Image: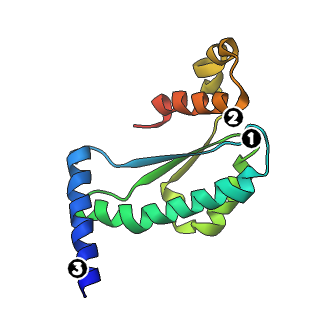
């Protein structure tokens, strides 16, 4: 009983904080990146399990808090690249099929605006592949997030 009461109170407090942040104007969008520019084993051993765990946590804790504040459940944007898109799509279909309507996967390698947005800048900066992926993701936010 005390645990349930504490959890309910914590959700209400979180809901009020979220409502103050968004002001009821727009929904929450949670952005993830499943990019693996070096095509390592990291995607399957670490990144996809972490993505699945994070999505489940957001649904378990964030969604009820938003709903308690009168907000819609969160939407999710996940950036991928050509090397990760298929595996990410498959994992999501198997692990969180109920979220498909609120998930949007964006393959930055197939995004026609990516070259315009980041191409010249990234070539001039001469960054390694990990930092290049980070900059691409950040620049894509301006176009793909509300």
Q: Nearer the viewer, residue 75 or 59?
A: 59
* Residue 14 is at least partly visible in this image: yes
Residue at 68% from the left image edge and 33% from the top image edge: 130
Answer with the quarter of the image where residue 134 lies. Answer: top right
Say how the picture is coloured: rainbow
**Left or right for 104, reference 133:** left
Q: Which residue is mark 1?
A: 82
Q: Nearer the viewer, mark 3 or mark 2?
A: 3
Q: How many residues crowd mark 3 within 10 Å: few (<14), some (14–19), many (20+)?
A: few
10 Å neighbourhood of mark 2: few (<14), some, or many (≥20)?
few
> On the image, numbered disc 2 is attached to which residue?
110
Image side of residue 89 versus residue 61, left or right = right
Residue 17 or residue 119, whichever sits in front = 17
Circle 1/circle 2 CB separation < 8 Å: yes
Measured in 3D between alpha carbons, the distance from the residue under mark 3 to the one under mark 2, in whole angstroms, is: 48 Å
Q: Relative to residue 47, is residue 64 drawn left or right? A: left
Instruction: State the image coordinates of residue 45 (x, y, percent, origin top left).
Output: 73, 58
Query: In the orientation shown, which residue stands out farthest toward the bottom?
Result: 1
- Residue at the location (46% across, 64% down)? 57
Dot 1 or dot 2, earlier in sequence? 1
Please report whichever mark, 3 or 2, sits nearer to the chain's N-terminal start.
3
User: How far apart in space, not on screen, are marks 1 and 2 (Cα)?
Assistant: 7 Å
Where is residue 42 shown, x and y percent of the image? 73, 51
Q: Residues within 10 Å of mark 1 (few under 14, many from 20)?
A: some
User: Looking at the rendering, in which quadrant would you find the C terminus?
Assistant: top left
Residue at image coords 20%, 48%: 20
Tell me if I can see residue 69 in this picture: no
Please name which of the two marks, 1 or 2, marks the residue nearer to the observer: 1
Q: Disc 1, disc 3: CB below 8 Å?
A: no
Indicate the position of residue 102 as horizontal and vertical percent values.
Answer: 48, 56
Q: Which residue is mark 3?
A: 5
Residue visible at 66% across and 57% down in the picture: 48
């Amino acid at each position: 009983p005390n645990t349930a009461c504490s959890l309910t109170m914590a959700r209400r407090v979180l809901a009020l904080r979220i409502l103050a942040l968004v002001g009821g104007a727009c929904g929450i969008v949670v952005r993830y990146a499943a990019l693996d520019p070096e095509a390592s084993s990291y995607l399957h051993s670490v990144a996809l399990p972490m993505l699945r765990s994070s999505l489940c946590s957001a649904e378990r804790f964030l969604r009820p808090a938003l709903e308690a504040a009168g907000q819609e459940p969160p939407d999710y944007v996940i950036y991928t690249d050509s090397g990760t898109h298929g595996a990410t799509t498959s994992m999501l279909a198997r692990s969180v099929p109920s979220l498909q309507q609120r998930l949007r996967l964006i393959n930055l390698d197939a995004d026609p605006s990516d070259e315009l947005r980041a191409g010249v800048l990234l070539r001039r900066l001469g960054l390694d592949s990990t930092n290049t992926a980070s900059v691409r993701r950040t620049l894509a936010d301006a176009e793909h997030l509300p």
